[in-house]
Image (spheres, rainbow, N blue to C red):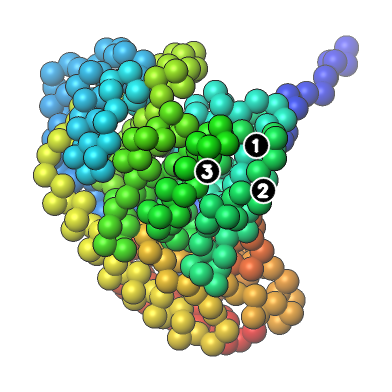
Amino acid sequence: MTPVTHPVRLTERINRIEPSATMAAVAEAEKLRQQGIDVVDMTAGEPHFPTPQHVKDAAIAAIQNNFSKYTPVGGTIELKDAILRRHATDFGSAYKREETCASVGGKHALFNVISVLVDHGDEVILPVPYWVSFKDMVRYVGGNCVLLDADESQGFRVTAQMVERLITPKTKLIILNSPSNPSGAVMSPEDMTAVVRLAHERGIWVISDECYVYLNYTGKNFSVGSLNEYRDRFLVVGSLSKTYAMTGWRLGFTLGPASVVGAVQKLQSQSTSNPTSIVQKAAVAALDSSQQCVEEMRAEYIKLRDHIVGGLRSIPGVKCTMPEGAFYVYPNVSAFFGKSGMKSGADIAHGLLHQAHVATVAGEGFGTTEHVRISYATSVENLDKALERMRKFFGGL
């Protein structure tokens, strides 16, 4: 008897989104490595530093002390208080326990917040270039992205005037990401304040993704969480991943009005429940201990940034703004379009990988067609190797 087969019918909402462009680039580079090819991987959006020893020690102690049971969904009181103390100390915020929720990474926190704020047909203003997952998160929950082209000539600047032009009666949310992934752009405190003030006046929500807030090289860290007079219309999403080299540990958090944070916690109670108990103990150690490790990593990133920007700008045809934060450069490679069949950033990224064996991420994943994203969270030796290969590749087009 011939078995009956039925087509697999997935939901409409899962078909609205695409796999992460960053993860796809990582996978493609890994295929070449499996073939024995020496690939310089510039895709990784994570620190090359190890997690600080005192953080690892706290996790080991948690295991040895059998801290392995369920905790409250949004994290232990100890963790919430550590999050609130660190943020208040560094940015002058004044949040309470019921106004924070710890989640399984910053990405999880963002997904939760977008899920509880954005409904079908709502419009979300999203500056371009954007982090790869923002657009897909909005589309997954049924929202519509209204794209705002940041001013590349001004270091990818976003202003309140630019935002205001895109506001309609359907605008529900504005997403800010400073320092930015992928461009490394840092919004000035004045520009961020003006956007938040505008949103407050119009009854629009703001999500401020501050996962790179401690990797700000302008000399002045800033969080919208310090704008206490407007706090009923914005949420801050933070993460320990980049700050403490804890990407694989998965610990992020949300700060915002208790009504929204309560909804986030309700959603989380039906998905992941609490973040890993052991990681919560490690997070407390990271937040409450000396922040010298953060400063040391930040100083090293500045040196690496200057090194790669200087190298890229020495390649004829490559244009590169100076990133003021995070650990990415976002060079404009449009000068090479029309050469050797190159038509887009995706073509350039493909050529760099398969001809030069340098793995980057095409700008298309971040909403632009003229760029590639390069992570400089690696050694100077790797940067020099990548720059040499890129110089030969672009010179041969």
Q: Gap between marks 2 and 1, in whole Å?
A: 8 Å
**Amino acid type for the residue under numbered disc 1:** Thr
- Residue 65 vs 289, above or below: the answer is above
Which mark, residue 166?
A: 2
Say what secondary structure mark 2 lies in: loop
Q: Earlier in the sequence, mark 2 or mark 1?
A: 2
Distance between mark 2 and mark 3 Cα atoms: 12 Å
Question: Which quarter of the figure is the N terminus placed in?
Answer: top right
Q: Is residue 173 left or right of residue 217?
A: right
Any part of residue 280 in sight: no
Give the vertical position of 203 relative to 97 (above or below). below
The circle drawn on residue 198 is 3
Name the residue at 47% across, 43% down. 196
User: Do tag 2 and tag 3 residues touch (Cβ < 8 Å)?
Assistant: no
Give coordinates of residue 148: x percent, y percent.
Answer: 63, 53
Q: Position of residue 393 (x, y in %)?
A: 56, 80
Disc 2 + disc 1, Cβ < 8 Å: yes
Q: Give the residue number, with chain letter if any, for mark 1.
A: 171
Q: How many marks?
A: 3
Element on which disc 1 rests: strand
Does residue 336 appear left or right of residue 314 in this picture?
right
Residue type highlighted by circle 2: Leu
